[in-house]
Image: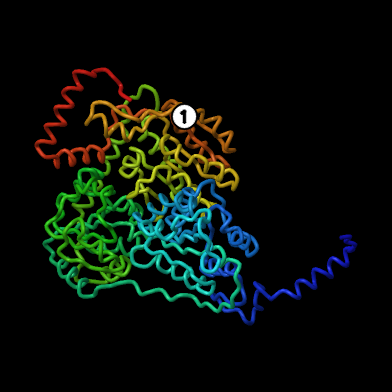
């Protein structure tokens, strides 16, 4: 066919076609718009985009694919902020990091099949660490469009259920806005966590008329009767109160501090709770309160006979393998009733939002106690002793002690800077020695212990706060899990400072294996050319190989204008880590006599047979 249409004719054809098409996705005039509503004739993809904007989504992390290309095209058309990750594990961790840093739900968008399976580890971390995330998951075609043996036809709902609070599945296009809004509400309700919305891809191109209002949030829980019981117990002036605060207190720094001052109670936190009270406060004693914790916390809580635990679950990692000593009386407060008394038996169980509980507690004048100068003086003394001990850096043969690095990062990272740690032995050193004075500025993958989490999580936080300093503390083994996300930081010009502890080993596993087996297995890593890696990914590079170089290198990294990979040649030497030592003792204590005999016999034989061998 011979086409002979000039430019004016082409414009005319275009106008005729546009006039013939239904008015789909056209914005309403200002007079008809309702704030927070999703209205008008829209495709399913347009409805997703409009709902995400209405919910205040700051960024969607993910990777487009065949089932979601229509959706991602609408993200661009409707200016939904998004960030392309290099792996769906990274996308889930970015959404997690964004949520931890902001307190608002992080959002990821992935395809079915491998998109979901790759994201499961990151979603599992968000679930176990109580982080609000919304996952928008495209799915294979459903309804009349369903056909057998579609690509990526793994059961999306079944895969997502174990790592989410709930999975919503759209069966028709008109459900989309309400399901997404319900997911946002559920993600932050009670104990926060991830929620998934699964949408068959054929719904993205279907059209409907929408008139979707915002979803009203459920009132936070508050058990008035249990609160009164807790107050009655705390009113006994003879009891010595200690407060154990978890991640549920993160947005309630002021009422938590007031409650501590009211009761003249030392405050310890879980790992997730670090920062919910300034650790410079006279009553703050650091993290934990057992033999795995800061020495200050262990000493301060030795005199506590009444524990007030707020917004905390007593999980394995934060308690050093359930090693927290049980005081005479325990009051447990949490928004999730299922968490109350599960690990540590509680005399009073209060199902309540931590903020509501602490705010109301702070108004109870009958609980006010006179200032305990003796307590605060002892806390100050214990902190000074711990600081002096931390300054004693043991000699190393072929690198830098990791605690030296942690102290240098603390010195040069601004007070409002964000530090993301990873699953290394040093995560416990950082929990003990890295002082945190602002909420939502220290982050750790606590209960799923997902290696490689810190790199993408830090990128998600940097996307949320481009003007704040963001750094990671990552082992070389963890780095291998998600190193490709450095390319994402370079592409997006996100100036994260990636500190890598390079000792060419899974040191954490070595620290656990050597005492029990007198050898190590599968813990040695290949030597990497980090300078070449940094150049290949397009990020800056600095390294420190000697203790004398460290301070200048960390200072230079913090001042670097873009993303930078900082290799720290690491030697743990004889560095003792309280958490590991405490957990080892707990584990041995729980062994049966027969099990202990078997371990000891094996150790004795290997001491003789393999003396001098390095293992692996």
Residue denoted by label 1: 544
- Picture quarter containing residue 18? bottom right
Residue at (56% x, 36% y) in the render? 540
Most distant residue in the left direction: 593
The x, y position of residue 66, in whole percent, is 58, 55
Q: Quadrant of the N terminus?
A: bottom right
The x, y position of residue 95, in whole percent, is 47, 55
Residue at (46% x, 61% y) in the render? 134
The x, y position of residue 172, in whole percent, is 52, 72
Q: Nearer the viewer, residue 506 or 69?
A: 69
Q: Nearer the viewer, residue 156 or 382?
A: 156
Residue at (17% x, 61% y) in the render? 346
Q: Nearer the viewer, residue 377 or 342?
A: 342
Numbered circles on residues, count: 1
Number of residues whose C-alpha sits closer than 10 Å to that of mark 1, classed few (under 14), some (14–19) or many (20 or more): many
Q: Quadrant of the C terminus?
A: top left
Residue at (53% x, 58% y) in the render? 60
Inspect this view and state whether residue 582 appears: yes
Most distant residue in the bottom direction: 31
The x, y position of residue 92, in whole percent, is 46, 52
Asked if residue 56 lies left or right of residue 546, the reply is right
**Colour convention:** rainbow
- Picture quarter containing residue 49? bottom right
Asked if residue 10 lies left or right of residue 163, the reply is right
**Up-down: is 552 above or below 40?**
above
Inspect this view and state whether residue 461 appears: no
Q: Nearer the viewer, residue 576 or 143?
A: 143
Mark 1 element type:
strand
């Amino acid at each position: 066919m011979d086409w002979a249409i000039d430019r004016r004719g082409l414009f005319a054809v275009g106008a005729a076609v546009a006039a013939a098409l239904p008015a789909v996705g056209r914005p309403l005039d200002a007079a008809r718009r309702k704030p927070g509503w999703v209205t008008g004739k829209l495709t399913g993809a347009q409805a997703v985009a409009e709902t995400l904007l209405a919910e205040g989504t700051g960024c969607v992390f993910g990777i487009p694919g065949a089932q979601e290309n229509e959706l991602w095209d609408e993200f661009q058309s409707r200016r939904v902020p998004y960030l392309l990750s290099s792996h769906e594990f990274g996308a889930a961790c970015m959404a997690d990091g964004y949520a931890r840093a902001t307190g608002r739900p992080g959002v990821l968008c992935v395809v079915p099949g491998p998109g979901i399976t790759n994201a499961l580890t990151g979603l599992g971390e968000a679930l176990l660490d109580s982080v609000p995330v919304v996952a928008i998951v495209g799915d294979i075609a459903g309804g009349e469009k369903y056909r057998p043996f579609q690509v990526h036809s793994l059961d999306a709902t079944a895969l997502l259920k174990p790592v989410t609070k709930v999975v919503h599945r759209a069966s028709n296009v008109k459900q989309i806005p309400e399901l997404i809004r319900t997911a946002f509400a559920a993600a932050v309700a009670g104990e926060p966590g991830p929620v998934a919305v699964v949408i068959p891809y054929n719904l993205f191109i279907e059209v409907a008329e929408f008139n979707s209002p915002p979803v009203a949030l459920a009132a936070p829980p508050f058990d008035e009767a249990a609160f009164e019981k807790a107050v009655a117990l705390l009113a006994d002036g003879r009891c010595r109160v200690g407060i154990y605060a978890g991640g549920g207190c993160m947005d309630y720094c002021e009422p938590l501090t007031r409650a501590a001052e009211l009761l003249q109670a030392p405050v310890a936190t879980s790992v997730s709770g670090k920062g919910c009270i300034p650790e410079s406060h006279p009553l703050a004693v650091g993290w934990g309160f057992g033999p795995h914790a800061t020495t200050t916390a262990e000493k301060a809580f030795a005199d506590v006979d009444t524990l007030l635990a707020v917004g905390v679950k007593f999980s394995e990692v934060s308690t050093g393998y359930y090693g927290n000593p049980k005081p005479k009386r325990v009051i447990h407060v949490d928004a999730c009733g299922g968490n109350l008394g599960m690990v540590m038996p509680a005399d009073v169980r209060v199902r309540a939002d931590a903020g509501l509980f602490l705010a109301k507690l702070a108004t109870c004048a009958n609980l006010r106690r006179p200032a305990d100068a003796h307590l605060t003086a002892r806390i100050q003394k214990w902190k000074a002793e711990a600081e002096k001990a931390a300054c004693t850096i043991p000699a190393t043969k072929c690198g830098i002690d990791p605690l030296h690095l942690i102290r240098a990062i603390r010195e040069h990272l601004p007070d409002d800077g964000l530090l993301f740690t990873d699953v290394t032995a040093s995560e416990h050193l950082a929990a003990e020695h890295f002082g945190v004075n602002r909420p939502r500025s220290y982050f750790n993958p606590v209960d799923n212990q997902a290696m490689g989490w810190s790199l993408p999580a830090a990128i998600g936080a940097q996307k949320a706060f481009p003007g704040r300093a963001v750094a990671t503390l990552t082992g070389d083994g963890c780095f291998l899990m998600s190193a490709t996300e450095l390319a994402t930081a370079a592409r997006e010009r996100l100036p994260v400072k990636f500190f890598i502890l390079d000792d060419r080993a899974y040191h954490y596993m070595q620290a656990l294996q050597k005492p029990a087996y007198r050898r190590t297995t599968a813990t040695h890593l290949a030597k990497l050319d980090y300078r070449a890696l940094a150049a290949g990914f397009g990020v800056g590079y600095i390294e420190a190989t000697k203790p004398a170089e460290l301070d200048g290198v960390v200072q230079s990294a913090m001042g670097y204008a873009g993303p930078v990979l900082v290799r720290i040649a690491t030697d743990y030497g004889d560095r003792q880590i309280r958490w590991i030592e405490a957990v080892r003792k707990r584990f041995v204590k729980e062994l049966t006599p027969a099990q202990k005999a078997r371990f000891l016999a094996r150790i004795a034989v290997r001491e003789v047979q393999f003396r001098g061998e390095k293992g692996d």
